[in-house]
Amino acid sequence: MDVLPTRLIGSQARTLVTHRLSESPQRGPSASRDGITSLDAAGFEARVMQGHGPIAVEFMSYSCAHCGAMEPVLQEVAETLRSRESIFRVNVAVQLDLAATYGIEGTPTLIMFSEGREVGRSEGPDPDAATVLETVTAPFGLQ
C-alpha cells in the first residue's frame, strides 16, 4: 500500500485524496470492475442471500498475489457465464465479518450459492479458466 505524505497543503491534499480514491479497487458497496461486482455486507445480503439462481462469490484480497493472478481467469469465466450465473467478489480485508461468517482462512476462496445457501466451495488458487469454469458451474449442472 502506498503511504500518503503527512504534510500537504490545501488543494494538494484534496487532489491526492481524490486520486487515491479514484484508483481504489473498491469504490463503494457495489463497485464494478470488468463485469464482477464487489459487495459489502448489505450488497451481499441483497444480491447473494436474497438472490435467485446460480451465484458464485470470490472471497479475495487485493494484496493477495494468487487473487491477482486469478483475476483475468475469473473475468473470462464471468464473461462466458454472463447470462447463466452471477459472479461477485468480497474483499476480505474490508469485509471481516463476512470472511468470518463463511470461515474464510485463505484467499482466493470461491463459494457457490443457490437460493441463499452454500452449495459448493473451492479454496486456493487455480489460474486455469477451464478448471474455474467447472468449479463455479458444477454445483448447478451448468456447463
Image (tube, rainbow, N blue to C red):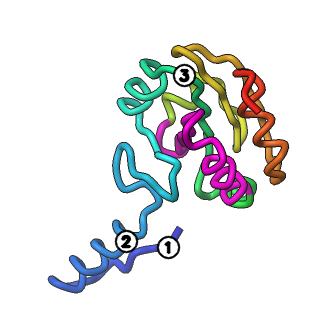
Q: Earlier in the sequence, mark 3 or mark 1?
A: 1
Circle 3 or circle 2, nearest the eye: 3
Q: Position of residue 143 (x, y in %)?
A: 77, 33
Three-letter amino acid code at the position of disc 1: Asp
Three-letter amino acid code at the position of disc 3: Gly
Circle 3 or circle 1, nearest the eye: 3
Rendered position, 1 above or below 32: below
Horizontally, is 103 left or right of 13 in the view?
right
Q: Furthest-left residue in view? A: 10
Q: Is residue 76 magenta?
A: yes
The numbered disc on residue 20 is 2
Between the C-alphas of marks 3 and 1, the distance is 40 Å
Q: Position of residue 62 (x, y in %)?
A: 58, 56
Residue located at (68% from left, 54% from top): 76
Q: Earlier in the sequence, mark 1 or mark 2?
A: 1
The numbered disc on residue 53 is 3
The stretch of residues the image draws in magenta is: 70-95
Q: Position of residue 9 (x, y in %)?
A: 19, 85
Residue contact at pointers 1 and 2, CB within 8 angstroms: yes
Q: Is mark 3 on a helix, strand or loop?
A: loop
The numbered disc on residue 115 is none
